[in-house]
Image (spheres, rainbow, N blue to C red):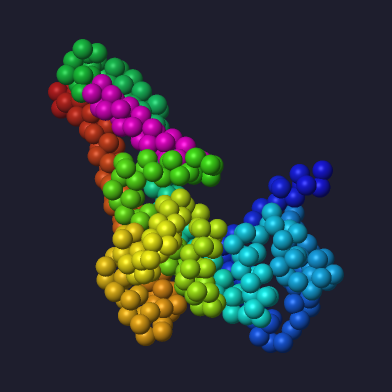
């Protein structure tokens, strides 16, 4: 029974994970013991109304063992597996503070990308729902009123005015159906992206929409660069970093590219050669990394590349929003204008003949 309850607990968001890592790093740098620091977090947590208490669960184990890794491992349903492994390495090497700082930066970057992606989906979706409601109200409530008014003025049902009105009504229904279909498809895609089918859905979207493919490629590059930069900064050799990276990556495309690089290196290829063959980074960034490796600044250059691709992903999402928003507004204006004209023109003709 206890196991079933634990499985229902959620992993914290990227922002919460970043904040936790940052707090642990600050505690360690100030000389505070891990036990006292997590006890403070647990006390604050118990004052809230949250149904889950990850810090309290951590404190119970840390109080007994003194190990953050053991505490996370015993509550692994609440913490990312990659984070647990990195904490283990940090405790073994005595570099837990450095690793927590790097993890904070990594999850902060993931949080920004996720927020940008949610905004890119949510805003057009809300606008689409508003379009459906507005056009639906016009077709269901407004047009019937005008029909009755025109009928009372003696407009013939087979006349040109009535025909024009029917054309406007049919156009409105067609557009309403198309927009409703797009909204429903978007909602279904969002739901499927939260299931095991997300890789198949993403593959379908990449083939259907080239801008989505370009964005996912940049997102993949940002995530891989961020993971490798974190590991290199923590003292891992590149071979070990590539071995561990797939555990932290959420999308299959990134995992496949990392595995390709690792397999090429096993064939006596250098990392730069394997990276170039994988097509993960642009040639310019491959050259940046080559210079960084030659000068002994490979971790810093890798983190810089991750930041560059993150900015490109955010800019790409903003660009998509900037295209979708005016398109939907223009569509709304055209449809409403057409419906109103189909009503007003016959009425103007009737009034003019009086």
Quarter location, residue 86: bottom right
Q: In which quarter of the image is the C terminus?
A: top left
Residue 201, x across and y down, in percent: 43, 41
Give the magenta range: 165-191
Identify which residue, 41 or 205, lies in the foreground.
205
Magenta portion: prevailing SS class: helix
- State whether residue 331 appears in this view: yes
Quarter location, residue 34: bottom right
Residue 84, x across and y down, in percent: 65, 64
Magenta span includes 242: no
Tag count in the figure?
A: 0
Residue at 31%, 21% (x, y): give it: 147
In screen coordinates, is 167 left or right of 77?
left
Residue at 35%, 75% (x, y): give it: 289
Residue at the outermost left position:
353
Residue at 43%, 67% (x, y): give it: 225
């Amino acid at each position: 029974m206890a196991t079933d309850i634990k499985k229902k607990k959620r992993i914290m968001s990227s922002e919460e994970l970043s904040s936790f890592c940052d707090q642990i790093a600050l505690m360690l740098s100030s000389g505070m013991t891990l036990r006292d620091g997590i006890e403070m977090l647990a006390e604050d947590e118990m004052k809230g109304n949250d149904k889950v208490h990850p810090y309290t669960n951590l404190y119970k184990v840390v109080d007994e063992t003194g190990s953050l890794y053991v505490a996370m491992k015993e509550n692994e349903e609440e913490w990312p597996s990659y984070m647990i492994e990195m904490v283990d390495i940090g405790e073994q090497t005595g570099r837990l503070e450095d690793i927590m700082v790097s993890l904070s930066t990594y999850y902060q970057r993931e949080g920004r990308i996720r927020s940008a992606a949610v905004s890119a989906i949510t805003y057009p979706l809300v606008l689409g729902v508003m379009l459906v409601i507005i056009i639906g109200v016009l077709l269901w409530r407004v047009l019937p009123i005008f029909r009755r008014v025109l009928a009372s003025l003696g407009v013939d049902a087979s006349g040109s005015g009535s025909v024009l009105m029917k054309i406007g009504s049919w156009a409105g229904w067609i557009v309403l159906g198309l927009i409703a279909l797009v909204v429903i498809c978007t909602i279904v895609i969002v739901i499927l992206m939260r299931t095991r089918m997300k890789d198949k859905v993403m593959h379908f979207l990449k083939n259907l929409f080239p801008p989505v493919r370009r964005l996912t490629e940049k997102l993949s590059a940002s995530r891989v660069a961020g993971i490798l930069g974190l590991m290199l900064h923590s003292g891992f050799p590149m071979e070990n970093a590539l071995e561990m990276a797939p555990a932290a990556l959420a999308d299959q495309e990134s995992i496949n590219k990392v595995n390709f690089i690792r397999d090429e290196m096993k064939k006596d290829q250098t990392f730069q050669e394997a990276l170039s063959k994988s097509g993960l980074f642009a040639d310019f960034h491959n050259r940046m990394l080559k210079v960084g490796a030659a000068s002994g600044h490979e971790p810093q250059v890798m983190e810089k590349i991750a930041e560059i691709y993150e900015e490109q992903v955010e800019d790409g999402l903003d660009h998509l929003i900037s295209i979708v928003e005016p398109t939907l507004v223009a569509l709304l204006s055209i449809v409403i204008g057409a419906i109103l004209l189909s009503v007003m023109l016959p009425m103007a003709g009737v009034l003019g003949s009086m």
